[in-house]
Amino acid sequence: MKIKLIIINIHKFFFLCRIDTTSVIAIVKELFKEHTDLILGFNTFLQDEYKIKLPLKDKNPPQKMLGGLEEAAHFVKKVKVNTC
């Protein structure tokens, strides 16, 4: 249930132009890193230049990751506070 709420908030913030495509992709990659089937499904909504490449092996991983769901929840709360 938490992941569903995070995805809904990410979607809302994206369409309100509070986060950009690159940020959405970074969050989705982290949330779905263990579920390549979900990443492939998400890719259907992306333009070719934004598609997430599999397997996930970032040459330049993000500098700080709190880890999965907690990271995404923290990000959504931060965006919400800074933009409301």
Image: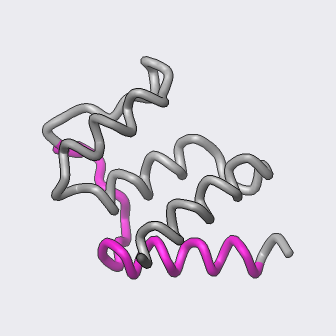
Q: Position of residue 23 (x, y in %)?
A: 54, 51
- Left or right for 10, reference 1: right
Q: Residue furthest right?
A: 84
Q: Position of residue 16 (x, y in %)?
A: 79, 52
Q: Residue furthest top?
A: 48
Quarter of the figure with the C terminus? bottom right
Q: Is residue 56 above or below residue 77?
A: above
Residues shaded magenta: 56-81
Q: Is residue 59 magenta?
A: yes
Q: Is residue 21 magenta?
A: no
What colour scheme governs how the chains and residues are painted in the rendered image of this protein? one colour
Between 35 and 22, the one nearer to me in the picture? 35
Looking at the rendering, which quadrant does residue 52 occupy? top left
Q: Position of residue 33 (x, y in %)?
A: 23, 56
Residue at horizontal 28%, vertical 56%?
A: 32
Q: Is residue 6 above or below residue 13?
A: below
Quarter of the figure with the N terminus? bottom left
Q: Residue furthest front?
A: 1
How many callouts does the rendering have? Answer: 0
Looking at the rendering, which quadrant does residue 51 occupy? top left
Residue at horizontal 62%, vertical 65%?
A: 9
Q: Is residue 43 above or below residue 2?
A: above
Q: Position of residue 43 (x, y in %)?
A: 37, 32
Residue at horizontal 50%, vertical 78%?
A: 73
- Left or right for 6, reference 69: right
Between 44 and 17, the one nearer to me in the picture? 44
Residue at horizontal 48%, vertical 30%?
A: 45
